[in-house]
Amino acid sequence: MDPWLYDSSVDKQLRLKTTCRKVEELAEEKSGRSATLISPLIFGGFNILYRIRLEGTSPDIMVRLPCPSLVQFPQEKTIHEAATAACIAKHTSLPIPRHLFYGDNSPVGPFVIMEHVENCGSVSARLTRPSEDPSAPHVLDPSVSESTLEAIWGRIARCLLQLYRMTFPKIGSLVEANGTYEVASRPITHNMTDMIRLANIPRSVLPPQGKTYQTADEWYTALADMHIAQLIFQHNDLVTSEDDCRNKFVARQIFRRLAKQGRLSCFGFADDTWSAQSSKISASTLSPAPSSSDAFRLWGDDFRAGNILLTDSDEIAALIDWEYTYVGPTQFILDPPWWLLIETAEMWSPDIDDWRETYDMRLKTWLSAMEKAEAEMTEPSPLPAPLSTYMRESWETGRFFLSYAARKSWAFDTMYWKFLDERFFGDRESGVLKDDLWKTRVHLLSEEERAAMEPFVRRKMSESKERRIVDWDPTEAKGRLSELLFD
């Protein structure tokens, strides 16, 4: 990835007594009561939290500010996540900390003020393997008991079943207006933040502010566009050789065409009649695809075990941090949770194959917990099959990997060539080397795409010889992207 300069001086400012006093003053202004900061401060993945005690009231409150050196769209992110949390709290019985105030501007920047919820830590901390290093990444403890997993996951499954029932008419981020919540802004995804923060991708090639999407296929295409933007604009460390560049070019062009043709949204469902895999699986054994043009559902890019807080009896105390949550294709929520092993697939050690084997084992426990949670529901499923059925089919058909690839630019290539390509187009010849993967599918490109590939590879390899950060003119960047979209 491109060098990322973490501006620690900016985050240090958030610890200064002067900043802490401004936070206290903000709490006093909004609450009308004297406020006192309780230390220590809490640093989350993208935010810093100040616990405040208000005179004469209980419980304490939390003032939550985005970390300036990490968050790329602080105003949008704050407005969207606050509206999302409030909407969920209004329409479900989920344990969402009450959001008291929020805004996109204050003396300390965008902020959210919410009630503090007493807890004993997150599901991630509860289930991680023991380690003497407190900074070590959380990874599911291999010795955790099945009964513990099923009990905790069953409670989470009941939460997801409530979220699953909320539907919206289009894809985008929620915005509050006069006590109602509407899809009125572009999705802000975790991947978009990483594109800017880690690779200096120009903002002008990302979805514009206010943009919403009427169909799942439109959003899949937008995600595919961003994968192509990453290939074009990430200057350092993306391609290792000419053939690696060709692999990435071919995979992205094919993926985008499938999105525009409406094929990704039906892949792995009974409606899939196009993939090589569909000829081997009877459609009668699969559930139908959700509608591609209405009844979309909330999806949280950053919703994971670390965002679920527990009591001392392993009940769910609170669901927190709704950043990077937007209304997305229902297909996403029909996948089993990617976070069952806590660690992401692309960061798993020793490799992705071990992650898949371990996940497959743990998935059985998750599905068992989900089925028990569904049996407790009195309302029928809002879709033709239970959520547990859709999740099982997602893993078996590879829809899980399709969604993962669509959402994550840095995981895309592994997911595409390892888990999707042969499901899409049939078996490759045995013994194909990694550098030759593109050769097995280059014939699927259009004549125009094939003609553009070699000039692009030459340019990319030439650019990669000089390690530097490139700042693009917005108009020039849009033009450069359009050269590889072939619309």
Image (tube, helix red, strand yellow):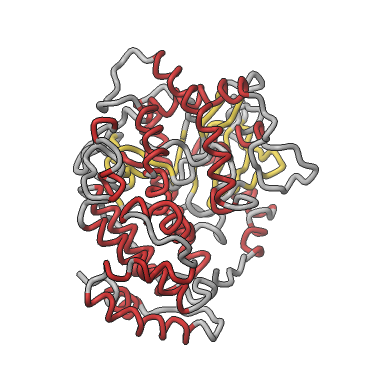
Residue 108 lies, in percent from the top left, at 54, 53
Name the residue at 60% across, 50% down.
348
Horizontally, is 467 left or right of 446 in the view? right
Whether residue 73 is visible here, answered yes or no, is no
In front here: 103 or 321?
321
Horizontally, is 342 left or right of 16 in the view? left
Residue 135 lies, in percent from the top left, at 72, 48
Name the residue at 42% across, 67% down.
437
Q: Quadrant of the N terminus?
A: bottom right
In front here: 193 or 347?
347
Q: Is residue 309 above or below residue 344?
A: above
Name the residue at 37% across, 15% down.
377
Q: Is residue 72 above or below residue 318?
A: below
In front here: 324 or 373?
373
Q: Residue 285's image quarter?
A: top left
Residue 38 lies, in percent from the top left, at 69, 38
Residue that extends furthest to the front in the rendered view of this protein: 430
Whether residue 419 is visible here, answered yes or no, is yes
